């Protein structure tokens, strides 16, 4: 595969702005996950706090419905295989 340092004609270097090396390195080093939202969801959840609150609430509801706790190793009744 041929490597080249040339950019495509439709890209201009001045349109890209000045890059900052290591701009997100500190967050990456912490082990943060980056998740891209669809535009529709980004309108509903404009901040990372809003997303985290919604997901925390969803996990809480899911745990209460299944009856399993975070540390539970019990298999839910609806997941048990039928006995022969």
Image (cartoon, helix red, strand yellow):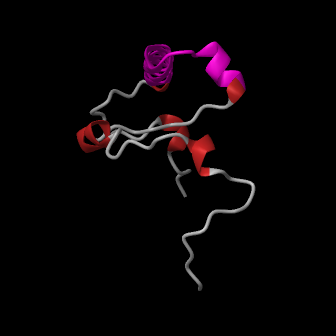
Q: Is residue 21 left or right of residue 13?
A: left
Residue 63 place in picture, x, y as percent: 43, 23
Q: Residue at x 31, y 45 (%)?
A: 22
Q: Nearer the viewer, residue 10 or 46?
A: 10
Residue 64 image offset from top left, x and y in percent: 45, 18
- Toward the front, the furthest residue is 14
Above or below, 38 relative to 60:
below
Percent x, y for residue 67?
42, 24
Of 70 and 19, the residue lying toward us:
19
* Residue lying at the far bottom of the rendered structure: 1
Number of numbered markers: 0
In what quadrant of the picture does the N terminus appear? bottom right
Q: Is residue 56 magenta?
A: yes
Is residue 73 magenta-colored? no
Q: Give the image quarter of residue 41.
A: top right
Q: Is residue 76 above or below residue 47?
A: below
* Residues shaded magenta: 40-65
Question: Magenta: predominant secondary structure element?
Answer: helix
55 up-or-down from 15: above or below: above
Q: Position of residue 76 (x, y in %)?
A: 46, 36
Q: Residue at x 62, y 42 (%)?
A: 15
Along the viewing direction, whichever of 41 and 9 lies nearer the viewer: 9
């Amino acid at each position: 595969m041929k490597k080249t340092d040339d950019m495509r004609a439709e890209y201009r270097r001045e349109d890209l702005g000045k890059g900052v090396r290591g701009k997100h390195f500190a967050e990456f080093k912490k082990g943060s996950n980056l998740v891209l939202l669809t535009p529709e969801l980004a309108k509903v959840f404009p901040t990372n706090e809003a997303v985290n609150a919604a997901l925390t609430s969803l996990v809480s509801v899911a745990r209460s419905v299944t009856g399993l706790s975070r540390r539970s190793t019990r298999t839910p009744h609806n997941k048990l295989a039928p006995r022969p």
